[in-house]
Amino acid sequence: VTVEEVVDNFDDLHPNLTVLPSWTIAAISVVPGGSHPSYTHGYYERDNAAYLEWDEIAADRDRFQAWIKKNVIESTADDFAARVEHLRKAA
């Protein structure tokens, strides 16, 4: 599972937060912005432009493969952080 942060104390947290049973988790990876292009309440907004762009990318195999190459295979964690930084500032 990917998370925005690991939280040890659940006192005073928003009721819509998700608590996962330990038996469902093999590993936890902290990935700020990891739910992009969706949102994470209190962290960043939904990236509507990315959703609209994705419709066209996903409909064309060549565009999809180029997107995967650029944004996944050849991308670094810093590249990803830069791509979603504007959302964090908006939240």
Image (tube, rainbow, N blue to C red):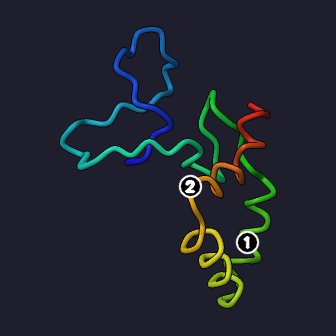
Residue type at numbered disc 2: Ala
| Residue 27 - label | none
Neighbor class of circle 2 (other Cα within 10 Å; few <14, some 14-19, many 20+) is few
Give the position of the C terminus as an image quadrant: top right
Residue 79 position (above or below residue 90) = below
Q: Residue furthest top?
A: 12
- Can you identify the residue that label 2 sits on? 77
Between the residue at mark 2 and the residue at mark 1, the CA separation in whole angstroms equals 24 Å
Depth check: give the residue in front, 25 or 66.
66
- Can you identify the residue that label 1 sits on? 55
Would residue 61 appear left or right of 89 to someone viewing this image? left
Q: Of tags 2 and 1, which is closer to the observer?
A: 2
Residue 48 position (above or below residue 88) = below
Q: Does dot 2 land on a helix, a strand or a loop?
A: helix
x, y (%) of residue 42?
A: 63, 27
Whether tag 2 and tag 1 are in contact, CB under 8 A, the answer is no
Q: Residue at x 41, y 9 (%)?
A: 11
x, y (%) of residue 14?
A: 52, 19
x, y (%) of residue 56?
A: 77, 77
Depth check: give the residue in front, 83 or 19.
83
Residue type at numbered disc 1: Asp
Q: Residue at x 48, y 16 (%)?
A: 13
Task: State which tag comes first along the sequence, 2 or 1.
Answer: 1
x, y (%) of residue 34?
A: 54, 49
Q: Residue at x 36, y 15 (%)?
A: 9
Neighbor class of circle 1 (other Cα within 10 Å; few <14, some 14-19, many 20+) is few
Q: Residue at x 64, y 49 (%)?
A: 81
Q: Residue furthest bottom?
A: 62
